[in-house]
């Protein structure tokens, strides 16, 4: 089973792509060794560095007929992967 959930394609993450860095949402239990292995087999690139960070879910609330309802989005984990110079990952190749 893959530890990768999805690539993160935001304006800030896309700016890092020009420097050879790609951002992925990963399983919370995944470690750097598992992430590196999955990216290298899935995309066929050489990973040189990985930075991971755990994200805290935002608090959300909304007003309903029954009163105020509040909750929290799910916690998560992100990985910023640096690939060898000259390697690229194309997220849009299978569209």
Image: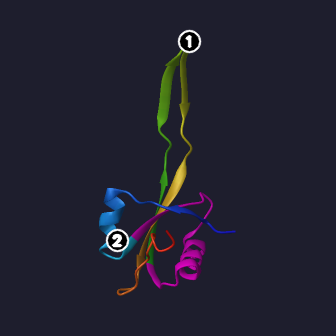
Q: Quadrant of the N terminus?
A: bottom right
Residue carrying label 1: 65
- Locate residue 19 relative to residue 54 in the image: left or right: left
Q: Is residue 55 above or below residue 65?
A: below
User: Alpha-carbon neighbours of circle 1 within 10 Å: few (<14), some, or many (≥20)?
Assistant: few
Observer-nearest residue: 65 or 4?
65
User: Alpha-carbon neighbours of circle 2 within 10 Å: few (<14), some, or many (≥20)?
Assistant: some
Hey, which quadrant is residue 86 in on the image?
bottom left
Hey, which quadrant is residue 66 in on the image?
top right
- Locate residue 4 relative to residue 58 in the image: left or right: right
- In the image, is residue 95 part of the stretch drawn in magenta? no
* C-alpha span from label 1 to label 2: 46 Å
- In the image, is residue 37 part of the stretch drawn in magenta? yes
Q: Evaluate if marks 1 and 2 touch, with contact meaning CB atoms under 8 Å apart.
A: no
Hey, which quadrant is residue 20 in on the image?
bottom left
SS type, badge 1: loop
Residue at x 54%, y 81% (from the top left corner): 40
The location of residue 69, given as percent across then percent down, is 55, 21
- Magenta-tinted stretch: 22-48
Q: Residue furthest front?
A: 95
Residue carrying label 2: 17
Q: Earlier in the sequence, mark 1 or mark 2?
A: 2
Residue at x 47%, y 74% (from the top left corner): 93
How many numbered marks, from 0 up? 2
The location of residue 56, given as percent across then percent down, is 49, 45
Residue at x 60%, y 73% (from the top left corner): 34
The location of residue 41, given as percent across then percent down, is 59, 81
Q: Is residue 44 above or below residue 94?
A: below
Q: Which mark is residue 33?
A: none
SS type, badge 2: helix
Residue at x 32%, y 57% (from the top left corner): 11
């Amino acid at each position: 089973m893959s530890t990768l959930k999805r690539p993160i394609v935001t304006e800030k993450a896309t700016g890092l792509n020009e420097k050879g860095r790609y951002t992925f949402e990963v399983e919370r239990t995944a470690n750097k060794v598992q992430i590196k292995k999955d990216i290298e087999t899935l995309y066929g690139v050489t990973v040189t560095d990985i930075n991971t960070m755990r994200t805290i879910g935002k608090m959300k609330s909304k007003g309903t007929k029954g009163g105020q309802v509040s909750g929290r989005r799910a916690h998560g984990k992100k990985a910023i992967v640096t690939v060898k110079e000259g390697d690229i990952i194309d997220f849009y190749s299978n569209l």
